[in-house]
Amino acid sequence: MYDLKVPQSEISRQYEYAEKIRALSSGRKYTVVTLGCQMNVRDSETLEGWLKRCGFVPAQNREDADIIIYNTCCVRENAENKALGNVIWLKELKKDKPGLIIGVCGCMMQEEGISGQLKEKYPFIDLVFGTHNAYMFPEYLYRVIASSERVFEVWDIKGYVPEGLPAVRNSRINAFVNIMYGCNNFCSYCIVPYVRGRERSRDPEDILAECRSLKAAGFKEIMLLGQNVNSYMGGGTAFADLLKRVNDIGIERIRFMTSHPKDITRELIECFGTCEHLMPALHLPVQAGNNEILKRMNRSYTNEKYLETVSHLRKVRPDIGLTSDIIVGFPGETRQQFEDTLRLVRHVRFDSAYTFIYSPRKGTPAAKYDDPVSIEEKTAWIEELIALQQCITSEALSGQIGSIQNVLVENVSSRSALTVGGKTPRGLMVNFEGDGSLIGKTVKVKITAAGKNTLKGTMEE
Ligand code: SAH
Ligand code: SF4
Ligand code: F3S
């Protein structure tokens, strides 16, 4: 028995509550709005799974819904403002539809005092729960529906691992599979460890069983998910070993995220040479290029160590595509230190990078550091970084012109039924002429042109 698991009896109880809700009424409509990262996307799939079990069906739009759930993020201030702005807008909707159930969950609910504030200030919110007790959703919803109670429950615990929950997957081609929850790294700017709790890994057998059933259901690509997958340690199995076992299942494509540069092992890098289903793509957030800043971020690696990892990866897999996250304007960062980031970006040549202006998060160490640089200056810096990265991205894309790529077709374009889109092994998006019958197939595509962020091509016969 894996000692971190939520007891199965507790999960069964939730299925019973879902049945009770279904018996009360079925055919009501739901909308789940997801903000934030892949973790939240995956959590929302579980919420949708529960809602389906409860007899709800997807609504066409928010106006049409009988229940709206907001799954929030709080990693930066603008994510929080977006969540609050959205929720306040619902007040108007509820005026026209008093029976509408409004629920708010996710990372922001784990912040100190938030749940209490929402309860007091926004009487139109019916349900609030956090990240640690999300598996209790049917029970809470039952209380809201059956006794018209307002339920506000957020747990401040280390967190357990719930297994056997339902899910409505967003795609039938790519699936997210959680391998661990939480984070122990406490980067000095980051709120995630406070709202997601300490690291806990799923039992490898549960992960493998999920991957096998996804393969049997026809999924072609699996993304293994965790805040820091490199420190996965489920039942004594390290991440590289788990990856090899997932590879042996024979799912066409495997990817994983996110990797912390400090924990990348030689064994893991070597998987890129030995695991035939592991795609040559890695998201490796560097955050900054200057050692003093990295130290104050509590990232535990240096610029030199990062570059060494990159060169090792490229030795093992010369065609690997690297992507990254970068923070601009960490408290006290000088222009010179920021230039080290520009230098690193020029050197590594990421395929793409997510760039953020530092956003102070209450309760994190960096929020107390001196931050003399103005927001105007930080904005000018980030624009410079974005322009540089755009140049590098364009060159990386143009470099693909003339090559023939294996593209896994994922969708039909929203603009034309005769255009489909998919990814190369390296993770670059390609659009080409084709129809819906190609979805889920891997086809050879000759790359003919490069746009700003995507490629164009023609299918080879
Ligand atoms: N666990 C992942 C990602 C976590 S959040 C990792 O360690 O890479 C995603 C990204 O948000 C981070 O990589 C970081 O670049 C950014 N981020 C986190 N906290 C931030 C803050 N306070 N201000 C600005 N960006 C932040
Ligand atoms: Fe945040 Fe750092 Fe953990 Fe990533 S590794 S979630 S940036 S504390
Ligand atoms: Fe946001 Fe939570 Fe992800 S804070 S970035 S949704 S882990």
Image (tube, rainbow, N blue to C red):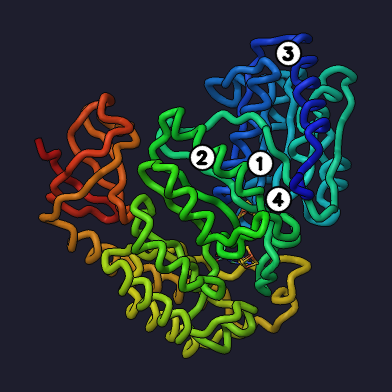
Q: Which mark is residue 107?
A: 4
> In x, y percent, where is residue 131?
74, 46
The kind of secondary structure element at disc 3 is helix
Q: Nearer the viewer, mark 4 or mark 3?
A: 3
Give the residue at x 37% y 76%.
Answer: 312
Query: What amino acid type should be assigned to the residue bearing mark 4?
Result: Cys
Tally of numbered tags:
4
Which quadrant of the figure shows ligand 1?
Answer: bottom right
Asked if 176 appears above or below 395 in the picture, the reply is above
Q: In this orientation, which residue lies closer to the viewer: 92 or 276?
A: 276
Q: Mark 4 vs mark 2: which is more N-terminal?
A: 4
Q: Mark 1 vs mark 4: which is more N-terminal?
A: 1
Q: In this orientation, which residue lies closer to the viewer: 13 or 355?
A: 13
Q: In this orientation, which residue lies closer to the viewer: 21 or 184?
A: 184
Q: Is mark 3 within 8 Å of ligand 3?
A: no
Which residue is disc 2 drawn over? 211
Label 4: how many Cα within 10 Å (few below 14, some 14–19, many 20+): many
Which residue is disc 3 drawn over? 22
Q: Nearer the viewer, mark 1 or mark 3?
A: 3
